[in-house]
Image (cartoon, rainbow, N blue to C red):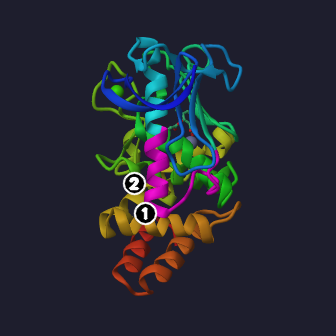
Amino acid sequence: SYNAVTEGTGVGVLGDTKKLNTYYSSGTYYLYDTTKAMTGVIETRTAKNLSSLPGSYSVDPDDNFNATNQRADVDAHYYAGVVYDYYKNTFNRNSFDNKGATITSTVHYGRNYNNAFWNGSQMVYGDGDGTTFTSLSGSLDVVGHEITHAVTERTAGLEYQGQSGALNESISDTFAMFMDQKNFLIGEDVYTPKIAGDALRSLSNPTQYGQPENMSGYVNTTSDNGGVHTNSGIPNKAAYNTIQSIGYDAAQKIYYRALTVYLSPKSNFSAARAAMLASAADLYGTGSTQYNGVASAWTKVGVN
Ligand SMILES: CCC(=O)Oc1c(C)cccc1C(=O)O
Ligand SMILES: [Ca+2]
Ligand SMILES: [Zn+2]
């Protein structure tokens, strides 16, 4: 037996076929990608519907991962590679820690689990219950959202409660938009598989899914760490306004610089506006079109 870097194929959650970076060892193919410029790898595992992590490697005998119960594994692996490439190609960031850390994803976590999360060390995806969600790794914006939680943790470290927590959530939604520029919706590919056209959240119209889109609508609550998935609508709308006024490329450069240079664990929405303006000034100059676009984007959501 020998080891080899191989290229397999797989069928994703939505039934789409895609190429996979796999690895052959002793008669078995693994969802184990050694092709990136990392010190680590991108590896995908399964919890087999139990809840012990990281679970066992996702494997296949012929490098064609086309079984129904492999679809979540296929997309977690494929989209993790897409997200790695986005951060490396756009900002020259080498994985979430910028030191080439291994990206581990575990799918089939729990039973009918309508959730996805970064647990501080790896990504974890439920299969959904088939009504609220289908397998949550089935959409790039979910995978991009989760890996961005890891990037935020290693950079600004925004505390996951109150305004800094809502900002943490918004950074993940916003970078998901930068990666997946087809619309301003989050989770639409995996949310309510029996209902077309809906989404978990909307950055263009947060109120459509029960989120405020202005500081006047900030929700003071103790649930959900102070409403982090509700109040994220306000910075999400500011991000949408920013992209609409200055375009995706300038916006993503400003957001990345804010995240890595200016934001800190207790930054609130007002500090976020200041961080974005400082970044725009650094990159394009105060009074530039980009600077003015950022200023109005945040003023419109009532954050000054
Ligand atoms: C877009 C991905 C997302 O929001 O995942 C979560 C879900 C589905 C439930 C609870 C928390 C999260 C999260 O990652 O914040
Ligand atoms: Ca749906
Ligand atoms: Zn999140």
Callout 2 secondary element? helix
Q: Which residue is located at x 37 percent, y 58 percent?
A: 240
Q: Which residue is located at x 63 percent, y 66 percent?
A: 263
Q: Residues within 10 Å of mark 1 (few under 14, many from 20)?
A: many
Q: Is residue 80 above or below residue 129?
A: below
Q: Is residue 117 above or below residue 216?
A: above
- Amino acid under disc 2: Phe
Q: Which residue is located at x 54 percent, y 59 percent?
A: 93
Q: Which residues are magenta?
A: 80-101
Instruction: Please indicate whether residue 151 sits to the left or right of residue 195 in the image.
Output: right
Quadrant in the picture for the N terminus = top right
| Residue nearest the viewer, comparing 128 with 14 | 14
Q: Which residue is located at x 30 percent, y 46 percent?
A: 183
Residue 143, percent from left and from top: 49, 38
Q: Is residue 155 above or below residue 25?
A: below
Residue 133 seen anywhere in this rendered image of the structure: no
Residue 300, percent from left and from top: 40, 67
Ligand 2: image quarter: top left
| Residue on which the image places disc 2 | 178
Mark 1 to mark 2 CA distance (whole Å): 7 Å
Q: Is residue 96 magenta?
A: yes
> Residue placed farthest to the front in the image?
1
Instruction: Please indicate whether residue 220 sits to the left or right of residue 71 in the image.
Output: right
Label 1–label 2 contact, CB within 8 A = yes
Q: Which mark is residue 252?
A: 1
